[in-house]
């Protein structure tokens, strides 16, 4: 054996003492020797990995690399040393490579030749494989013929009879990619992050938003706008692309809370300086409870008219007196912007009107009271404007 051959043999023997790595791992190394059948690649550590010369040739059979070049390859075997491959992702060409791909769970490239009973016939290099109908995609498609003639990545899930009997799956790779994408998306989801997603469905309580990788968050109806939202479908629709803010992330329960209104100015931030005690404002009744009626003074800002300030008798029907949607004139009694509370009064409006009527009557000096004077119910009806259409 010549000295160069002895050197090459020694290097090859050294490669058998390869450092411990896992099959399927991608390594980057430098080509340190090229022999007639294999090349040695320095991947770090005390030994080299082996790659077949055929892996390093182009379609014309010429070497694509030289000593000193760096390449990336996948570990297909760790038995008796490291064996690498660069072509498994492009389509294995030999039974040995197919078996390596099967054992290392590496993807191979295949062309869907035709639909057959129960699935598809797939051509992987010079080999035929079978892909069950349930394994061609992650979702069921109504037109099986759409896959014919297309080239996809597959995983070999069964390897029998020295490679003559192969079963492959495209779905396995798709689901792995989705899981990896979902994991990456979840890592980027921190409270306060502003992201773009697509609305997948809209319900009465809110909308579900796909944030990428199959990860969904809930945009609750209360977070859609500063004003009360009565119909979520008027805010967003399935298929809409929207920008939202991450409010809460519950990793244990896999729940993500999103907000839309947080991307606009909070109207309460200016309430303390724009609302003054004693001033008269006009608003719209939004909801009614036993203790009073809520009035929207501007989008996102509501105040409460307590029953004691409604001008109604104790046994009066508050819901009937304040129909939702009706406009109403009120006086500001108290403003607490920090607590997001404003106390309103209709009674103060009525009292002011009565005082004006008394003053006008006194100034005129008429003998009788003005028309309608003393009728509290009539004055209350006057304070309410017709319900908004």
Image (cartoon, helix red, strand yellow):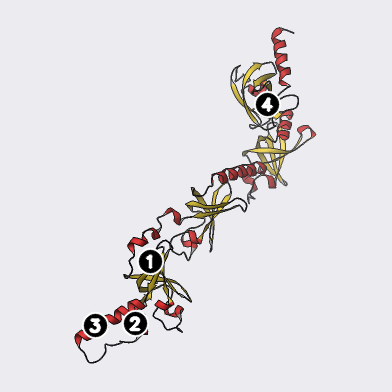
Q: Secondary structure at mark 1?
A: strand
Residue found 74% across the figure and 29% down from its top = 95
The image quarter containing residue 323 is bottom left
In which quadrant of the rendered view does residue 370 lie? Answer: bottom left
Q: Quadrant of the N terminus?
A: top right
Q: Report the mark closest to the observer, 4 or 3.
A: 3
Which residue has dot 1 on it?
335
Tell me which residue sits at (68%, 26%) in the image: 84
Mark 4 and mark 2 in contact? Answer it, CB < 8 Å. Answer: no
Q: Secondary structure at mark 3?
A: helix
| Mark 4 and mark 3 residues within 8 Å of each other at the beta carbon | no
SS state under label 4: strand
Q: Position of residue 6 (x, y in %)?
A: 72, 11
208 relative to 335 in the view: left or right = right
- x, y percentage for residue 312? 41, 81
Distance between the alpha carbons at the discs numbered 4 and 3 = 101 Å
Label of residue 359 in the image: 3
**SS at circle 2:** helix
What residue does disc 2 label? 379
**Label 3 – label 1 distance at C-alpha:** 30 Å
Q: What is the total number of numbered labels drawn onto the structure image?
A: 4
Vertical relation: 41 (above or below) 140: above
Q: Distance of mark 2 from mark 3, alpha carbons?
A: 17 Å
**Residue 84 marker:** 4
Distance between the alpha carbons at the discs numbered 4 and 1? 74 Å
Name the disc covering residue 299, or none.
Answer: none
Counting from the top left corner in percent of width and height, residue 303 is at 41, 68
Q: Earlier in the sequence, mark 4 or mark 3?
A: 4
Name the mark nearer the viewer: 4 or 1.
1
- Asked whether the viewer can see residue 242, the reply is no
The first of marks 2 and 3 along the sequence is: 3
Is the residue 210 above or below the residue 99 in the image? below
């Amino acid at each position: 054996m010549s000295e160069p051959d002895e050197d090459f043999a020694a290097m090859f023997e050294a490669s058998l003492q390869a450092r411990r790595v896992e099959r399927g791992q991608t390594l980057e190394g430098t080509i340190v020797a090229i022999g007639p059948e294999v090349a040695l690649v320095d991947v770090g550590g005390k030994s080299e990995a082996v790659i077949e010369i055929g892996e390093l040739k182009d379609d014309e059979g010429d070497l694509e690399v030289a000593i000193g070049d760096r390449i990336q390859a996948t570990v297909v075997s760790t038995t008796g040393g490291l064996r690498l491959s660069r072509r498994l992702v492009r389509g294995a060409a030999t039974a040995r490579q197919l078996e390596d791909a099967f054992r290392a769970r590496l993807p191979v490239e295949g062309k869907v030749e035709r639909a057959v009973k129960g699935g598809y016939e797939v051509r992987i290099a010079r080999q035929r494989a079978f892909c069950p109908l349930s394994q061609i995609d992650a979702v069921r498609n109504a037109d099986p013929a759409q896959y014919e003639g297309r080239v996809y990545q597959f995983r070999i899930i069964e390897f029998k009879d020295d490679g003559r009997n192969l079963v492959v799956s495209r779905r396995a790779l798709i689901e792995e990619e989705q899981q990896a994408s979902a994991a990456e998306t979840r890592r980027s989801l921190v409270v306060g992050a502003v992201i773009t997603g697509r609305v997948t469905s809209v319900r009465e309580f809110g909308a579900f938003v796909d944030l990428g990788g199959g990860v969904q968050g809930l945009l609750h109806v209360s977070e859609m706008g500063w004003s009360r939202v009565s119909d979520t479908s008027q805010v967003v629709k399935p298929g809409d692309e929207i920008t939202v803010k991450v409010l809460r992330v519950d990793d244990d329960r896999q729940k993500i809370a999103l907000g839309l209104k947080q991307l606009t100015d909070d109207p309460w931030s200016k309430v303390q300086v724009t609302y003054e005690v004693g001033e008269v404002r006009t608003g719209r009744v939004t909801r009614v409870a036993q203790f009073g009626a809520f009035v929207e003074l501007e989008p996102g800002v509501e105040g409460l008219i307590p029953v004691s300030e409604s001008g109604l008798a104790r046994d009066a029907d508050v819901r009937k007196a304040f129909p939702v949607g009706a406009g109403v004139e009120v006086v500001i009694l108290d403003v607490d912007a920090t607590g997001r509370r404003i106390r309103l009064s209709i009674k103060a409006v009525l009292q002011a009107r009565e005082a004006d009527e008394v003053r006008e009557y006194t100034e005129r000096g008429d003998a009788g009271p003005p028309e309608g004077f003393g009728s509290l119910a009539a004055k209350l009806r006057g304070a309410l404007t017709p319900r908004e259409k």
